[in-house]
Image (tube, rainbow, N blue to C red):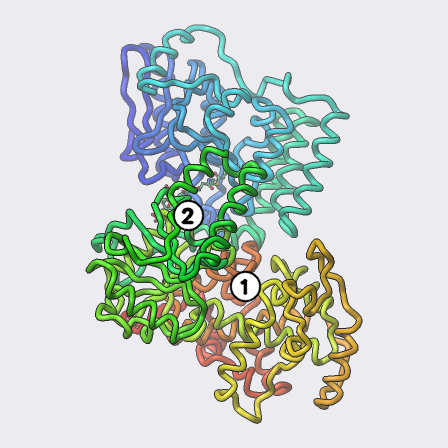
Amino acid sequence: MNDSVHLQNHNEIAVITIDNPPVNALSPAVIEGLLAAFAQSEADDTVNAIVLTGAGKTFIAGADIREFGKIVSGQSRGRALLDLIDRVENCRKPVIMAIHGTAFGGGLELAMAGHYRLADPGAQVGQPEVKLGLIPGAGGTQRLPRLAGVAKAVEMCAEGNPVKAEDAARLGILDGMVRGDLVAEAITFAREVAGKSIPKTRERTEKLGDASQNAAIFAAARETARKKQRNLIAPLAAIDAVEAATQLPFDEGIALERRLFNECLFSDQSKALIHVFFGEREVARVPDIPKETPTLPVNTAAVVGAGTMGSGIAMVFANAGIPVLVKETEQAALDRGLATIQKNYANSVKRGRFTQQFADERMQLITPTLSYDGFSQIDMVIEAVFEGMALKKQVFAELDRMCKPGAILASNTSTLNVDEIAASTSRPESVIGTHFFSPANVMRLLEIVRGRASSKEVVATCMQLAKKLGKVGVLVGNCRGFVGNRMFHPYIREATFLVEEGASVEAVDKALYDFGMAMGPLATGDLAGLDVGWRIRKEYRHLEKPDVRQAFAADRLCELGRYGQKTGAGWYKYDENRRPIPDPAVADLVRRWSAEAGIPHREIPSQEIVERCIYALVNEGARILEEGYALRAVDIDIIYINGYGFPAYRGGPMWYADTVGLRRVYDRICEFERQHGELWTPAPLLKKLAESNRTFASFIREPGATAA
Ligand code: 3H9
């Protein structure tokens, strides 16, 4: 047919194969090839039935996401897939879908327009469009409830999670599972159904339920969406579209789905989420480390330090099936670490995330130890001891003596200089930073810190390992705080300044929560422990300029023993369930401290709160980008979304600034500089891009001029 669609005749059964690697996305060429293949098969009198399958590792991963930009810019009407789907459903010969790998999005929609669906037991089906800020746009919201029932269809379209073949067969999305050769079995099945009446999904109504039951399902789904997918428009649109399937004739339902799909497609949310989808894949690409770079095997690991981070990191390795030693210096600390791990697994089993058997098997992979015995066999060690340079250096010198040549020696430092740590070994090329985020077994982000001497093999291995560990690995350069924490510092500073200027603790947190952050900055401080920042600020006090304003309120709270959640009080008070309660005592204290410091209190609108905090992130991000500590603006976005609770539907801080317009962001930052002084000096890159009407996304650095 064409390069991406092949047609073969197997004794009266046409087999159409999509061959569009890597995931058989429905590109214009695939759709065109399929239309031609169906036309030819229908016209061919020797063909009695048609089997559609995918070459390679999957059936169809969905519409081609890269095409959406063309619809938005008016270059394409985007109707071709709908036309194909109509053609398939109206085909006069039975169409059997032979599904392996994934039938996602448009792939499932096409499959549901077929007359029968058979699948490999390892297959998955799903409508993940909502994760791209979209709804199914090729009939998914109308056909899925007809096959799976209303409740499951609402859940799948609004939440976007995949369903395994076995469950899909039970639900009626699939007609059966095939354990042997999928295509051969589909051909046999095709012979059985050829010539018989052809069932069409659009004509089915028996699973569409009754009005009162449905009303309860939709009300519950809307409530869940508002809570769990806060501020997102696509989940609610998906629910509306499925509701239409229960209330309108099929064609009218399709028309409504189309309208809602387009509304979502043209929204800023969808553009941002598509940016994030490609961004999460883009960050794996490191310009000077090609794909073919050899990597080192990581079949065994060790973690030094069994505190909160160390025990979480050990779980990450165990969960990926990698045996891991956990070393402590004292039995009591080791016992505490192991108890934490056991408690975490027990909670996961209780919540249904893991089976007891899975948890038991993972525990078996974790071996506690008080010595370096066995370290000489280990492929990769992650140091997760207390954040102090002297101790880290001592541990690395020991690892240098104990570990085999070529073993990767990684530090989980969140701020310290990886080159200085590497210098305490005789093999700085094997040393790298792997900055996990707390809780390590939950948070997806892994900052991989490239030292001056880190070898390309070591960097490539860690980038690849991140994926195996279920993390998004982002390569960053070795500056203080790396990318994430370096930007977090001015963000928290502004939140504190705002309180010192008269905004209430709750108002600051609410403004940023409403903006979409997972938590307000002050509540985050309480969770992490205010003493952490206090300790760092004390250590670096000698670097502060005397005439530059410093935030003081958090340090004063620490002096009063208010470290946050762990002491039952910080910016907030906490009840026994660690629920935050606004504390009038804090408001009084801050008012007094501000008066003493000569800072007048004033009303601060929530817009200013958001701009002060978010633009502080953006300005520091611009410096990091220009200095080469992040490879691209999107790397910063992915860090903030996966490690700091930045809303994905705003695309990350740099993408968000692009959508506001860099000129506007720059002008506002200049205003802040006039009001608040040199802490707000605009980053030179921001100034340059704003003045030339460009975006962060368009910024490409000279090759080689990077520390990441
Ligand atoms: C849709 O269908 C809308 C319709 O309802 C209506 C339309 C009118 N398009 O993830 P990987 C690329 S919306 C284009 O690393 P894995 C991906 O960028 C769509 N490209 O592999 C990457 O490229 P590169 C609904 C796509 O094995 C490469 O393929 N469907 C698409 O870890 C490999 O991807 C979805 O949302 C695509 N649809 O995971 C499914 N999908 O190598 C999105 C992937 O240059 N896809 N690419 O970086 C996925 O969830 C995963 O890719 C999948 C494979 C699970 C399939």
Amino acid on which disc 2 is placed: Gly
Label disc, if present, on residue 216 of the rendered structure: none
Question: Which image quadrant: the C terminus?
Answer: bottom left
Quadrant of the rendered image containing residue 376? bottom left
Query: Label 2: which residue?
Result: 470
Q: Where is residue 111 in the image (x, y as percent from the top left)?
A: 46, 26
**Is residue 624 left or right of 137 when viewed as pictured?**
left
- Classify the position of ligand 1 by quadrant: top left, top right, bottom left or bottom right: top left
| Kind of element beneath mark 1 | helix
Query: Label 1: which residue?
Result: 656
Q: Residues within 10 Å of mark 1 (few under 14, many from 20)?
A: many
At x 35% / y 25%, what residue is drawn?
Answer: 53
| Kind of element beneath mark 2 | loop
Question: Which image quadrant: the N terminus?
Answer: top left
For the question of whether residue 446 can be seen, the reply is yes
At x 22% / y 55%, what residue is drawn?
Answer: 293
Query: Which of these two is toward me, 439 or 329?
Result: 329
Q: Does residue 53 lie above or below 324 as drawn? A: above
Q: Where is residue 192 in the image (x, y as percent from the top left)?
A: 39, 7
First in sequence: mark 1 vs mark 2? 2
View extreme (front): residue: 331
Q: Position of residue 516 (x, y in %)?
A: 62, 58
Question: Of discs 1 and 2, which sits in the foreground?
Answer: 2
For the question of whether residue 638 can be seen, the reply is no
Q: Does residue 281 lie above or below 495 as drawn? A: above
User: Do callouts 1 and 2 mark residues in contact (Cβ within 8 Å)?
Assistant: no
Query: Which of these two is toward me, 307 or 621?
Result: 307
Query: Which of these two is toward me, 97 or 592?
Result: 592
Q: Where is residue 648 in the image (x, y as percent from the top left)?
A: 54, 55
